[in-house]
């Protein structure tokens, strides 16, 4: 259908700024994650070759399929971003209309576009017209509970040529508060014929099964639950396909993955920046595997500057500590 081996994806990794860069997505892929979306790329800044946006749009030959998420306010820049992403080797273009961050919505991008469906449609039409690649769309239920217009936008997006929708089961005004309403996603599923993916608060195979049951969605997208757990999307997909729960890897595999992520991050960003970028991944991984018992070790490791000392400390922790990882 789209030249992809599995579409729609049963389980995908959500785009998360500062998280789903190439090194992290590479680890997710190594554990069997099949569909990983890039960090959000500001299309106008990509066109102006801003280094961080160029870096986010990279990945050709490394991540397959290469799904690049674009954000923007003006049709011209979304179209230009789509063309540049296609030239960079993208396989799929995803449009961001779901980000709730004030830094994004204050620029009338992300989920702010759900308050302006006509403008949102212009952006979609410009993006679809600019590329031969499949275009997908990620959004929320609406701006707030007085304006739950995801189904209406979904119908218009489908008519404009969007090939798949991902819906986070909250409004923008909720940010990440409360609980994602998977049942409300069913309104979007019923409004369109294209695949709909359910997103929000999915951190286990049981969550994924319930989200699919309540929403009728074709698959699920894993977001914050994958922080510190690059193995999780692949494990949930295996559980959905073959039964059982999402079992974590061995402690040895977790350590080797974290060390590979650390080395890859240093190489990708250069050592000076890479040491700082990697700290959040180290912290999340220690929290996920050791909890409060390793709070002091986490603090100590995340202040080290010498990569050799960081590696040695991680090896000592993982080879000597007890993990708390359990089936998801």
Image (cartoon, rainbow, N blue to C red):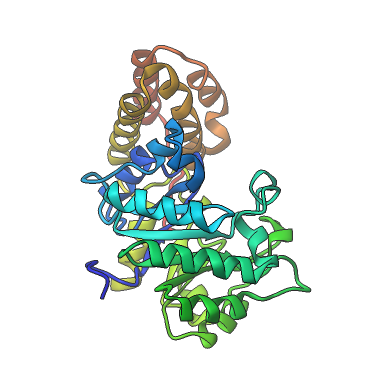
Image quadrant in which you'd find residue 135:
bottom left
Q: Count the labels in the image.
A: 0
- Residue 210 screen position, x and y as percent: 51, 75
Task: Report the side of 304 relative to 239 (left or right).
Answer: right
Q: Quadrant of the N terminus?
A: bottom left
Above or below 46: residue 143: below
Residue shown at the point (41%, 24%) measured from the top left: 274
Q: Is residue 138 shown above or below 250?
A: below
Q: Is residue 25 left or right of residue 64?
A: right
Image coordinates for residue 127, horizontal then vertical, percent: 44, 62
Residue 112 visible to an observer of this rendering:
yes
Q: Position of residue 129 (x, y in %)?
A: 40, 67
Q: Residue at x 55, y 67 (%)?
A: 122
Identify the residue at image location x=31%, y=53%: 86
Q: Is residue 285 above or below residue 147?
A: above
- Most foreground residue, 250 or 102: 102
Q: Nearer the viewer, residue 238 or 90?
A: 90
Q: Residue furthest front?
A: 76
**What residue appears at the point 42 percent right and 46 percent down from the top-left corner?**
229
The residue positioned farthest toward the right in the image shown? 146
Taking the image as drawn, is residue 207 in sight?
A: no
Q: Position of residue 312 (x, y in %)?
A: 34, 18
Quadrant of the snapshot with the C terminus: bottom left
Does residue 216 lie above or below 74 as drawn? below
């Amino acid at each position: 259908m789209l030249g992809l081996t599995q579409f729609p994806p049963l389980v995908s990794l959500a785009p998360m700024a500062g998280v789903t860069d190439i090194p992290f997505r590479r680890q997710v892929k190594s554990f069997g994650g099949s569909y990983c979306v890039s960090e959000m790329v500001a299309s106008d800044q990509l066109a102006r070759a801003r280094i961080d946006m160029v870096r986010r749009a990279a990945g050709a030959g490394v991540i397959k399929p290469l799904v690049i998420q674009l954000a923007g306010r003006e049709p011209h820049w979304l179209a230009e971003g789509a063309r540049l992403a296609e030239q960079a080797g993208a396989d799929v273009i995803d449009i961001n209309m779901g980000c709730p961050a004030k830094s994004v919505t204050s620029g009338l991008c992300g989920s702010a576009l759900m308050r302006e469906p006509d403008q949102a449609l212009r952006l979609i039409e410009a993006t679809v017209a600019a590329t031969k690649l499949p275009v997908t769309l990620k959004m929320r239920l609406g701006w707030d509970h007085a304006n739950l217009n995801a189904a209406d936008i979904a119908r218009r997006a489908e008519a404009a040529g969007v090939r798949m929708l991902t819906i986070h089961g909250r409004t923008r005004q909720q940010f990440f508060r409360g609980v994602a309403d998977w049942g409300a996603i069913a309104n979007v599923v019923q409004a369109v014929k294209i695949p709909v993916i359910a997103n929000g608060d999915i951190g286990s195979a049981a969550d994924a099964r319930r989200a699919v049951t309540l929403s009728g969605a074709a698959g699920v997208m894993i977001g914050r639950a994958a922080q510190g757990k690059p193995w999780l999307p692949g494990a949930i997909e295996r559980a959905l396909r073959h039964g059982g729960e999402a079992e974590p890897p061995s402690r040895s595999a977790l350590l080797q993955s974290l060390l590979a992520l650390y080395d890859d991050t240093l190489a990708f960003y250069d050592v000076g920046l890479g040491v700082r970028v990697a700290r959040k991944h180290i912290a999340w991984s220690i929290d996920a595997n050791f909890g409060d018992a390793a709070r002091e070790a986490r603090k100590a490791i995340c202040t080290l500057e010498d990569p050799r000392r960081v590696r040695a400390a991680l090896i000592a922790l993982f080879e000597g500590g007890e993990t708390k990882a359990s089936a998801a």
